């Protein structure tokens, strides 16, 4: 039974990872309670209220076999409004954990990155070798975290692996959070009898991936030896326009509403979807169809 530490283990992604691993591993959570998606954890899981930037947590971190780093400032909007806050959380926090990990006997450091590192695509689908030219401070900070992970692997031999997540959705997204994902916002508004609001003309495309598929990938890279020092896309390999997403949500909800349009957001890209060929080679297969995932969230 491995000792696994999940940072941000009360958040949207982290809480699902914790639930998957609890029972088969000795799981510890570090979370600052800034935006918990689930405050009740499975029996046997230890929760420590702390921030990943705090040097005092290094002794706790270094005693684990596996570190899964999900804690982050995740909003493109907030990163453009307060880039220093974004960098402190996403860059300094990651370095603090890496320092802790290299002082112990950590067997795997799994870093959750973002498709925001790519910026505006020059080709589709986007593979791992695609140029990385992020448009937002958030994208820059997540890419910096990746580079630090790779540097700690090459310099100190720390067994790191990075996963670039595309557009994640789950029933635990908080629609009241101004930085929440587009799917949860659409569903919340439609459920309240209000029109979904689209930033821009709705033609922008995204690769929407279920949190359950993301957790599948995290469990794979925890255990496979060939993944060390590598970066993997995590998506579905298919794209949907935001306009079509809004229409699908309306159809599944049975509401007679039409989308409203407003000005585009700063830092948003137009088109994006993943080439997941590399991930498939290590056994990753996305299982949740978007329509299925939307029905689950609507219900």
Image (cartoon, helix red, strand yellow):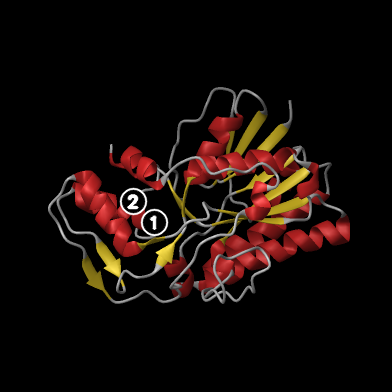
Q: Quadrant of the C terminus?
A: top left
User: Which residue is the site of mark 1?
Assistant: 181
Q: Quadrant of the N terminus?
A: top right
User: Where is residue 256 shown, x and y percent of the image?
Assistant: 12, 53
Name the element at disc 1: loop
- Crowd around label 1: few <14 · some 14–19 · many ≥20 (10 Å): some
Discs 2, 1 touching: Cβ within 8 Å: yes
Count the marks. 2
Name the element at disc 2: helix
User: Where is residue 267 shown, x and y percent of the image?
Assistant: 45, 75
Residue placed most toward the observer, 145 or 127 = 127
Q: Is residue 103 left or right of residue 58?
A: right
Q: Is residue 231 left or right of residue 81?
A: right
Give residue 126's quadrant in the image. Answer: bottom right
User: In the image, what residue occupies the spot 75% across and 56% down?
Assistant: 230
CA gap, disc 2 and disc 1? 6 Å
Q: Which mark is residue 229?
A: none
User: Where is residue 261 shown, x and y percent of the image?
Assistant: 23, 71
User: In the image, what residue occupies the spot 77% across and 38% down?
Assistant: 63
| Residue at the limit of the structure toward the left, as seen here | 256
User: In the image, what residue occupies the spot 56% across and 38% down?
Assistant: 17
User: In the image, what residue occupies the spot 41% across and 77% down?
Assistant: 266
User: Where is residue 89 shown, x and y percent of the image?
Assistant: 58, 61
User: Which residue is the site of mark 2?
Assistant: 184
């Amino acid at each position: 039974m491995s000792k696994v530490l999940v940072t941000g283990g009360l958040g949207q992604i982290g809480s699902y990872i914790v639930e998957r691993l609890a029972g088969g591993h000795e799981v510890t959570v570090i979370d600052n309670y800034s935006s918990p998606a689930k405050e009740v954890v499975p029996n046997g899981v230890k929760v420590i209220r702390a921030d990943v930037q705090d040097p005092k947590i290094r002794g706790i971190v270094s005693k684990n076999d596996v570190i899964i780093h999900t804690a982050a400032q995740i909003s493109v909007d907030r990163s453009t409004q307060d880039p220093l806050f974004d960098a402190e959380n996403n860059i300094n926090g990651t370095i603090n954990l890496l320092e802790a990990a290299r002082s112990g006997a950590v067997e795997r450091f799994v870093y959750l990155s973002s498709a925001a590192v790519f910026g505006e695509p020059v080709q589709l689908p986007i593979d791992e070798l695609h140029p990385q030219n992020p448009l937002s401070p958030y994208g820059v900070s997540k890419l910096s975290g990746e580079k630090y992970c790779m540097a700690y692997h090459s310099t100190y031999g720390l067994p790191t692996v990075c996963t670039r997540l595309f557009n994640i959705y789950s029933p635990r997204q908080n629609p009241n959070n101004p930085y929440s994902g587009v799917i949860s916002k659409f569903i919340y508004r439609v459920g309240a009898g209000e029109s979904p609001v689209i930033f821009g003309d709705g033609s922008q495309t995204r690769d929407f991936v279920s949190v359950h598929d993301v957790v599948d990938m995290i469990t794979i890279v925890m255990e496979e030896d060939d993944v060390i020092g590598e970066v993997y896309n995590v998506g579905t390999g298919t794209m949907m326009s935001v306009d079509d997403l809004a229409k699908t949500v309306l159809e599944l909800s049975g509401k007679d509403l039409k989308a409203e349009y407003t000005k585009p957001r700063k830092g948003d890209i137009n088109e994006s979807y993943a080439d997941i060929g590399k991930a498939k080679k290590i056994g990753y297969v996305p299982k949740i169809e978007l329509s299925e995932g939307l029905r689950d969230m609507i219900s």
